Amino acid sequence: MHIIHTIAQLRSELGSTTPNGKSIGVVPTMGALHDGHISLLQSAREQCDVVVMTLFVNPTQFNDPADFLKYPRDVARDSLIAENAGVDFIFAPAPDEMYAQGFDTVVSVPGLSNILEGASRPGHFDGVATVVTKLLNIVRADRAYFGQKDYQQLQVVKRLSADLNIGTEIVACPTVREPDGLAMSSRNVRLTPGQRRAAVVLSKALFEARKSMQAGEMDAVKLAGAIAKTVSDEPLAKLDYAVIVDPENLKPLTTIDLTNRAVALIAAKFGDVRLIDNIELFR
Ligand code: PAF
């Protein structure tokens, strides 16, 4: 496995490694790797000849500079995990390599970005959309792997990739959960033991909603209300939103019918740790 820091070197390495139509898979990350990332790397390894993992803590997607500074960084640990997962190249650019002096472009997907997570984190998805566009243009992979856990991010990336004719297939990978149901996230390590126990309420509320739907409850507003109540009953949780939305445009649904798929999205704070989760609702 090679660790590469410049765009020129990455392009030259990929040019000489993939001359005969070999496929490239890219997994964009900010490091702090957990089993969710490993499952993305494994999918890329199974489906592509060459696997690139990008490792870049992107400053432009943090609306709070303190959060950016606090973000866990351990390149040695992440490199070992990536190597064990079969990654061929880690692309770990310095901030100046990604944002050279004079950088002045923003990629924005406003309809999907200013709601839900974007309402609480202004500018976050513009930062994500801009860096992901850059990474996809730099690597020029056949496939790029993103977790469904960050559902809104996934829809933003799918939209920009289609709208800008990026030409990389966006592959959505299922959320990986702890044995008790909590969705894996780099933020989980910041929970106190009590908050960690309480945080299971998110997946519990979502699983219950799916069960109610499977038992015939098709009123999306009622289902969302039940999710909100379950979370609000947990004293350590401070609910931000619980909604049932259309999976592509993320607009709230009032009813679920057999022809429209639906996804339940949830966000809550445990102390100062904000967690999100979601579940696709199928009948
Ligand atoms: O999901 C993440 O880790 C980041 O938002 C991403 C996609 C790597 C962009 O910085």
Image (spheres, grey):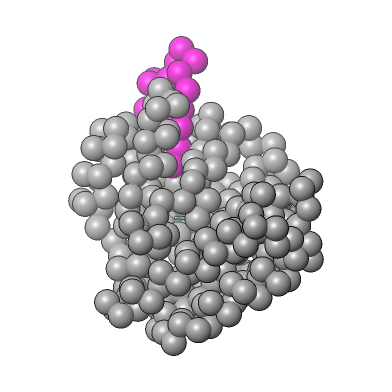
Q: Quadrant of residue 151?
A: bottom right
Most extreme residue toward the front is 215
Give coordinates of residue 279: x percent, y percent: 56, 56
User: At x 33% / y 74%, what residue is drawn?
Assistant: 197
Give coordinates of residue 207: x percent, y percent: 52, 61
Residue closer to the observer: 140 or 157: 157
Residue closer to the observer: 101 or 206: 206
Horizontal relation, residue 74 to residue 66: left or right: left
User: At x 58% / y 80%, what residue is drawn?
Assistant: 229
Q: Is residue 14 above or below residue 206?
A: above
Residue 155 is one of the magenta-drawn residues: no
Give coordinates of residue 281: x percent, y percent: 63, 54
Range of residues picked out in magenta: 8-27
User: At x 32% / y 53%, what residue is drawn?
Assistant: 34
Residue closer to the observer: 6 or 23: 23
Q: Is residue 11 above or below residue 106?
A: above
Q: Quadrant of residue 172?
A: top right
Residue 12 is one of the magenta-drawn residues: yes
Most extreme residue toward the bottom is 235
Give coordinates of residue 211: x percent, y percent: 58, 59
Q: Quadrant of residue 80?
A: top left
